[in-house]
């Protein structure tokens, strides 16, 4: 096993062979799939002021971006968005 500078870092990383073995076992159904745990931080724990600033920026972001674009650029963005919406996900 490789040596890490931070001893806690070694606990989080798997050896390449261990990762390959786990992936194979999950693929053939010999082991349940690994589930990524949800974020440790909930919305209730987030800083309310930071959340509000993020929301304000998100509300005006698209409008501010569109103001700096030419009509051709806006048409191109709209075309790409429509293509993405109608793309099949098969």
Image (tube, grey):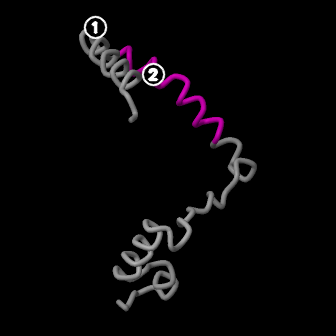
> Compared to 80, does 38 lie above or below?
below
> Residue 41 location, x and y as percent?
67, 57
Q: Main secondary structure of the magenta part?
A: helix
Q: Can you tell which quarter of the image residue 51 is in?
A: top right
Whether residue 53 appears in magenta in the rendering, the answer is: yes
Whether residue 65 appears in magenta in the rendering, the answer is: yes
> Compared to 62, does 19 lie above or below?
below
6 relative to 72 in the view: left or right: right
Q: Residues within 10 Å of mark 2 (few under 14, many from 20)?
A: few
> Compared to 80, does 41 lie above or below?
below
Along the line of sight, the residue nearer the viewer: 68 or 20: 20
Q: What residue range appears in magenta?
A: 51-67
Residue plotted at (46% across, 85% down)? 10
Residue of label 1: 71
Q: Quadrant of the C terminus?
A: top left
62 relative to 81 in the view: left or right: right
The CA span between labels 2 and 1 is 15 Å
Residue of label 2: 62
Label placed on residue 63? none
Q: Residues within 10 Å of mark 1 (few under 14, many from 20)?
A: few
Q: Quadrant of the N terminus?
A: bottom left
């Amino acid at each position: 096993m490789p040596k890490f500078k931070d001893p806690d870092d070694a606990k989080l990383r798997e050896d390449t062979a261990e990762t390959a073995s786990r992936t194979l076992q999950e693929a053939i159904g010999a082991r349940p799939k690994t589930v990524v745990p949800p974020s440790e931080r909930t919305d209730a724990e987030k800083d309310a002021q930071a959340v509000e600033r993020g929301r304000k920026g998100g509300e005006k972001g698209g409008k501010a971006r569109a103001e700096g674009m030419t009509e051709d650029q806006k048409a191109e963005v709209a075309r790409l968005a429509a293509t993405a919406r109608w793309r099949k996900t098969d």
